[in-house]
Amino acid sequence: MHRILAALQFLLAGAFAQEGITPSQSEIVAKLADTRIKESSGLARSIRHEGIFWTMNDSGGEPCVFAIDLQGRTRAKVRVADAVNFDWEDLASGLDEQKRPVLYIGDIGDNFNARPTVQIYRIPEPEIAAEGAEVPETFSAASIHWHVTYPGGPRNAEALLVHPKTRRIHILSKSEDGRSGLFAFPMGLDVLSMADKGRENANKPVQLEKLADVTFIGYERTGKRPSDDRQCTGAAFSPDGTSLVASTYSSLFEWRLPGGKPTPEAFAAKPVRMVPDLLRQLEAVTYDADGRTLWLTSEHLPTPLVRVRR
């Protein structure tokens, strides 16, 4: 039996090497108990509370974010002030100008490439309920929001990410042919509150800058179409800013960013590819504090919280 297992491991290792897949271990850590979280479409690690993640529902859901713990319990439900969930697709966490934890919410879905602008909201990261306590719905503090446009016209996107060093807001677009783009706010703009910009400019759209082309090849995989592997569904920067991971419906791709800069040269290099085997459909990804462990979730019930280790 030991010889059979050893031979099987050898064959599997060879298969991974041939496909260019980095070996990893996937584990369902919890299944979310709260059935209100039925289309988890974004995931962000809490900076304020250890062992907590924030998520939210996809398009048409309430304009609310949920805090979940490693046991799958809901620890907060927070209604975002002055917000509408038109097509929320991703979350990111970060620090504001005074180094206070904040959450960014990307209302950036546009399946028909028809929205003249998309929205990004920022709120202070909320408090959570104590373990075992009731979880009443609360309201966030006042939100800051930006109306956003792309150079060249509308694009669909499901990946919002904020660089941990520069605090620059980025969007990675989604395309069925795998030809995506990494876009970013003009340098420095993300540190300006709407109040600072003045009422006359409060609703003036921000035009993103294109930083790089990002190509998702679309690998064959049992039970999946190559097109599933071309469509970006989430992304995040590592805590030190030296890596960027992106999810498709069936894989994870990670690029190294020399000097912490997301440049065209960085995305021209071949990424690390990982294939978690516990999710029907990858929808969100974020890094743990160690910068190596990854956390995933998906749009189906019961909603799983998956940990991926190299």
Image: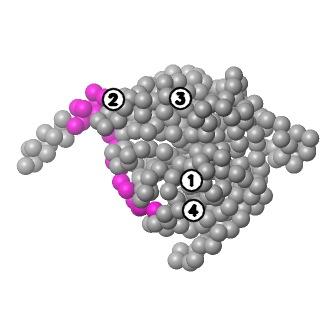
In the rendered structure, find residue 220 and report the number of the disc placed on it. 2
Q: Which residue is mark 3?
A: 175
Q: Dot 4: within a 10 Å radius of its alpha carbon, few (fewer than 14), some, or many (20 or more) residues?
A: many
Q: Amino acid at mark 4?
A: Ala
Q: Residue at x 91, y 45 (%)?
A: 199
Report if residue 72 lies within the magenta region: no
Give yes or no for contact between labels 1 and 4 (Cβ–Cβ under 8 Å).
Answer: no
Q: Which residue is mark 4?
A: 67
Q: Secondary structure at mark 2?
A: loop
Color encoding of the figure: one colour
Which residue occupies the foreground of this view, 231 or 161? 231
In the rendered structure, find residue 57 and report the number of the disc placed on it. 1
**Residue 19 seen anywhere in this rendered image of the structure:** yes
Residue numbers of the magenta segment:
12-32
Give yes or no for contact between labels 3 and 1 (Cβ–Cβ under 8 Å).
Answer: no
Sequence-wise, the earlier of marks 3 and 1 is 1
